[in-house]
Amino acid sequence: MAQIRLLADMNISPQTVTFLQQQGWDTVRVAEVLPATTPDSEIMEFARREERVIVTQDLDFSTLLALGGYNQPSLITLRLSASDPDTVNQKLIKVLPGVEELLEEGCAVTIQDTNVRIRKLPIR
């Protein structure tokens, strides 16, 4: 069973959140816990407090992590050519088990169509 807890950004489909929950991943969507207008910096702070890994398609989170020199929260950024829920679901369920331990330690994972890039936090 999954140990990490995920926080799906607003650009992640509710269908993906449901799919991940059905697969046993502790996942909540930002809209369930914060107002829709919450800035990315506050979403990051919430994720850090709640020990959740942010799942997003938004590149701003990587920038915020790098500029702030943070070692938490861990981050999964999706850079896929297709962003439909089925494609995202299949990619996440394939990648998550292999990066779970690294996410617990603090890292930024970028998932692309053909590869996965992992950077330890803090990003330098």
Image: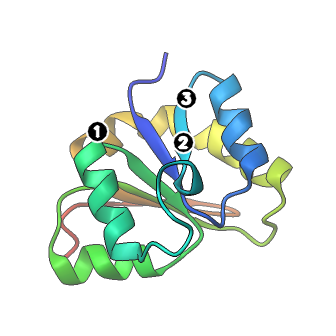
Counting from the top left corner in percent of width and height, residue 14 is at: 73, 49
Residue drawn at x 38%, y 64% as measured from the top left: 43
The three-letter amino acid code for the residue at tag 1 is Glu
Q: Residues within 10 Å of mark 2 (few under 14, many from 20)?
A: many
Q: Which residue is mark 3?
A: 25
Q: Are marks 3 and 1 in contact (CB under 8 Å)?
A: no
Look at mark 2 in the image and give the residue it sits on.
28
Q: Residue at x 77, y 72 (%)?
A: 81
Classify mark 1: residues with Cα within 10 Å, few (<14), some (14-19) or many (20+): some
Residue at the disc numbered 1: 104
Using the image, determine if residue 88 lies above or below residue 4: below
What x and y, as percent, mark residue 23? 66, 24
Q: Compared to 22, does 27 lie above or below?
A: below
Q: Secondary structure at mark 2?
A: strand
At label 3, the amino acid type is: Trp
User: How far is disc 3 from disc 1 in space, using C-alphas?
Assistant: 14 Å
Residue sitting at the far top? 1
Is 88 above or below relative to 105?
below
What separation in Å lies between label 2 and label 3 (alpha carbons)? 9 Å
Q: Say which of marks 3 and 1 sits in front.
A: 3
Question: What whole-number distance in Å separates the C-alpha atoms at marks 2 and 1?
Answer: 17 Å
Of 108 and 10, nearer the camera is 10
Q: Circle 1 sits in a helix, a strand or a loop, which is it?
A: helix
